Amino acid sequence: MSNEFQPILVTCSFPDATSARATGKKLLEEKLAACVTLIADVESQYHWQGKIESSREHLTHIKTSALLFEQVSKLIRSSHPYEVPEIIATEIKYIDPDYTLWMQDSLKPSSRA
């Protein structure tokens, strides 16, 4: 594994703004996220227990480091109201260098490798 800082974007949906904000705040307080963006009122369609379901949700984009993904995932699972929460990480291939530095300064020192 590279010793270079690897920013990632974690996507997670929540049933309401209250749970999305609460989880985002915990991630920020623990310095597991540099920024959490809440996107209100999206519609998700999905398979659940043998049926196709549809529900209104609140989507979060969590900017963090690949080295913190397991901790981020654990915190989300510990407080998320869903039985199977969506926790998807995408590597950020292109990013502004100043934003990268800001992220590094905002996260736990262990995220820097």
Image (cartoon, rainbow, N blue to C red):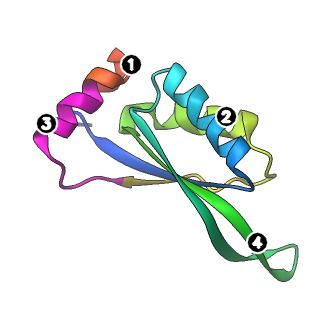
What secondary structure is marked by label 1?
loop
Task: Select label 1 or label 3 by which is in front.
Answer: 3
The earlier-in-sequence mark between 1 and 3 is: 3
- In the rendered structure, find residue 108 and report the number of the disc placed on it: 1
Q: In which quarter of the image is residue 1?
A: top left
> Seen in the image, is 68 located left or right of residue 3?
right
Separation of marks 3 and 2 at Cα, in angstroms: 28 Å
Name the spot of residue 74 as percent of width and height, x first: 63, 34
At 58% from the left and 39% from the top, the residue drawn is: 73
Please tell me the numbered disc located at residue 22: 2
Rounded to the nearest whole Å, what is the CA distance between mark 3 and mark 4? 37 Å
* Location of mark 3 (residue): 98
Q: Magenta stretch containing residue 13, yes or no?
A: no
- Indicate the quadrant where residue 22 lies: top right
Q: Decide which of 54, 111 is in the foreground and name it.
A: 54
CA neighbours of label 4 inside 10 A, class few (<14), some (14 to 19), many (20+): few
Q: Which of the two marks, 2 or 1, is nearer to us in this view?
A: 2
Q: Position of residue 42 (x, y in %)?
A: 61, 69
- The answer to whether marks 2 and 1 mark residues whose Cβ atoms lie closer than 8 Å is no
Q: Position of residue 70 (x, y in %)?
A: 53, 35
If the image is split into quadrants, where does the C terminus sit?
top left
Q: Is mark 2 on a helix, strand or loop?
A: helix
Comes first in the chain, label 2 or label 4? 2
Identify the mark nearer the N-term, 3 or 2.
2
Q: Quadrant of residue 63?
A: top left
Q: Provide the residue designation for mark 4.
A: 55
Amino acid marked by disc 1? Lys
